[in-house]
Amino acid sequence: MKPAVIQAVCRVHQLVPDAGTVGVTAIDKRPVEGSVRVRRLGLHGDVQADRANHGGEDKAVYAYSASDAEWWAEELGRPLPPGCFGENLRIAGLETGEAVIGERWRTSGGVVLEVTMPRIPCATFGRWLGEERWARRFTQEGRPGAYLRVVDTGEVAAGDGIAVVHTPAHGVTVGEWFRGPTRERAEALLDADAEGGIRIAPALRAYVEAAARRADPLA
């Protein structure tokens, strides 16, 4: 099994006009050369236009797997270079959809990142890619990528290795939650949070609590 590596580090290239309420979007991320400082709110030099729904400590960094990008490139019949999904890190050798919520990664440069939640596709994402019904297609395929919290700051660069240094016992992965936010998975997350094993991001908690209240269809 090949070690996981950061294939590319991406940050905003320019703000581009968008038909949404904000009027512009910072989804145009492109690879940069050399090392980039990673702070609590993300990569130095990166921005978010819609700060009500993007950014913050629990969505400081967005990572997407190279294997998922390659799958989509074949599906859409066009290249999808690093950054085109709005990701900050394009990662090879590590499947973001299989990462457990609360899992921690350490880069070879010493940055520690914690998986917080899947990316929920929005209309801006679809307009940027120019694909009809994109949000629905992206959701149905269940390849969301992962938002990350910065635990230890530092610098990252293309070619840095990534090691999984902690995996919570609850076992709920980003992909499983994205595809099926069931009552059982919600209760596992809430129990882990109550026991101090993870810290559920506020943006995710409302969905987790709602799923935990749902009646069991088999009851």
Image (cartoon, rainbow, N blue to C red):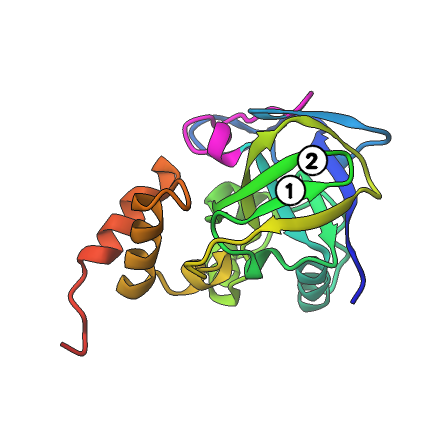
| Quarter where residue 92 is shown | bottom right
**Residue 135 x %, y %:** 48, 54
Q: Quadrant of the N terminus?
A: bottom right
Nearer to the camera, 29 or 198: 198
**Residue 118 x %, y %:** 49, 50
| Quarter where residue 79 is shown | bottom right
Element carrying mark 2: strand
Image side of residue 113 versus residue 77, left or right? left
Q: Are marks 1 and 2 in contact (CB under 8 Å)?
A: yes
Q: Magenta segment: does it hold 81? A: no
Q: Is residue 43 above or below residue 195?
A: above
Three-letter amino acid code of the residue under disc 1 = Glu
Identify the magenta region. 43-59
**Residue 11 x %, y %:** 70, 31
Nearer to the camera, 164 or 175: 164
Q: Can residue 133 be seen in this snapshot?
A: no
Please give the label number shown on residue 68: none
Q: Nearer the viewer, mark 1 or mark 2?
A: 1
Three-letter amino acid code of the residue under disc 2 = Lys
Q: Is residue 214 above or below residue 103?
A: below
The residue identified by callout 2 is 29
Q: Quadrant of the C terminus?
A: bottom left
Residue beneath the point at 69% across and 35% down: 29
Q: Magenta segment: does it hold 52? A: yes
Residue beneath the point at 23% across and 51% down: 210
The residue identified by callout 1 is 87
Q: Residue furthest front?
A: 195
Image side of residue 130 versus residue 31, left or right? left
Residue beneath the point at 35% across and 36% down: 202
Element carrying mark 1: loop
